[in-house]
Amino acid sequence: MLAKLKRIDWYIVLILGVFMIVSSLLIYSATVDVPKYANFNFHIKNFIYYALGFFLFLVISLLDYRILLKLSWYAYGLGIILLLGLYKFGVVREGAIGWYQLGGFDFQPAEFMKLALIMVIASFMSMREGEPLRLGKDVIPIGLIVFVPFILVFEQPDLGNAVIYIAILLGMLWIGNVQFKHVAIGAIIVAVIVGSFYYLYQHYHDSIEAYLQANNKGHWVKRIDTFLNPEQADKDARFHLERAQIAIGSGSLLGDGYLKGDSIHNNFVPVAYSDAIFVVVAEEFGFVGSAVLLMLLFSFLYRMILIALKSSDRRGSFIVIGIVSMYVFQIFQNIGMWFGLLPVTGITLPFISYGGTSLLINMVSIAIVMSVQIHQEPEEDLA
């Protein structure tokens, strides 16, 4: 065990410790002056989730990831069952039926499914042993593996997590040696779909809005309009985005100071402790604080990429790049949406936003990355 502990990337552990402190301080600032959150103590719960997360990190890091790979299809099957079970036993949060309530803990299967997808795709692609992926026998089957949970999560409706599945798919296909002609075909299909969507949405806006309203998905129109048609967007949705941008701008170079953000502490920015946590950083610590946080996040990603490059096992590299792809998309989406670069979704900022299930799954994900770092010996040499 001591030899394994010596192989841990302690720089990653140090960054996780910094994330724990920064996250808890930001969550406290985002909730301290909001009466409805007064008795929830989100910042304390965040410390508790981090403590549990570090325990899981240590245990799973020391477990050979190749053992977990053998269980990947079971994890995928369990994830599908949990997603299906939501339609009978799930509870609604923020308009989506995406959680199981287990005592005082809310469990979100869509978060678990991210990791299950990464593991099962890595297992599937490893069978090619580095050879280019074939369209009919590899790319399409992998796409179908992702499509099933994508539809189940999309229907909750939870567009944010559903799109993350696509980001994981694209990142892993790329590292899995997808052929250029297949990339070209995919790019053309995506361009046609996006172009068609834009045309149809603009020309049949009212009909689409009426249909979505009738199916309890009216909030999608609000979010899309805020991005594509801000002048026509719902007043409340536009107000929230505008207030977030005002808060970011008011932070200027050095910020207003910790616990002194006017927009945050007057409750002008919704769910600041979760989706809009970056707005807290920008308003209270300014451009400098935001840049430091981004540097920490990308240093974190860089260390993981190094582990993928050094891995002697292709499966380990696939897993790490899948996890990196997930984080890159989440970071870009979460921050970009508050600048108006992307539509507003419920995607959180990894390791910084509040969220019990997402934080624990993130810690388990990093534990598996660390397991790849630790277990480099040939599989037949395992004790």
Image (cartoon, grey):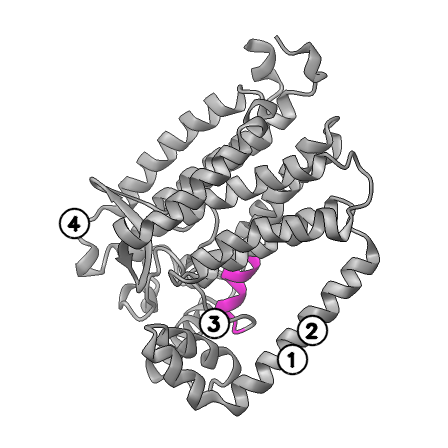
Q: Which mark is residue 271?
A: none
> Which residues fall within the magenta stretch?
331-340
Residue 284 place in picture, x, y as percent? 41, 59
Question: Are discs 1 and 2 less than 8 Å apart at CB?
Answer: yes
From what the image shows, is residue 314 above or below residue 218?
above
**Between marks 3 and 1, how big is the CA–CA gap?**
32 Å
- Amino acid at the residue labelled 3: Gly
Q: Which residue is mark 2?
A: 191
In the image, which is nearer the foreground, mark 3 or mark 2? 2
Q: Which residue is mark 3?
A: 249
Badge 2: few (under 14), some or many (20 or more) residues near its Cα, within 10 Å?
Answer: few
| Closer to us: 231 or 278 | 231
Q: Quadrant of residue 235?
A: bottom left
Task: Answer with mark 3 or mark 1, whichever residue precedes in sequence.
Answer: 1
Residue 71 place in picture, x, y as percent? 53, 29
Q: Is residue 327 left or right of residue 303?
A: left
- Magenta-colored stretch includes residue 339: yes
Badge 4: few (under 14), some or many (20 or more) residues near its Cα, within 10 Å?
Answer: few
Q: Residue at x 48, y 59 (%)?
A: 151
Q: Which residue is mark 4?
A: 39
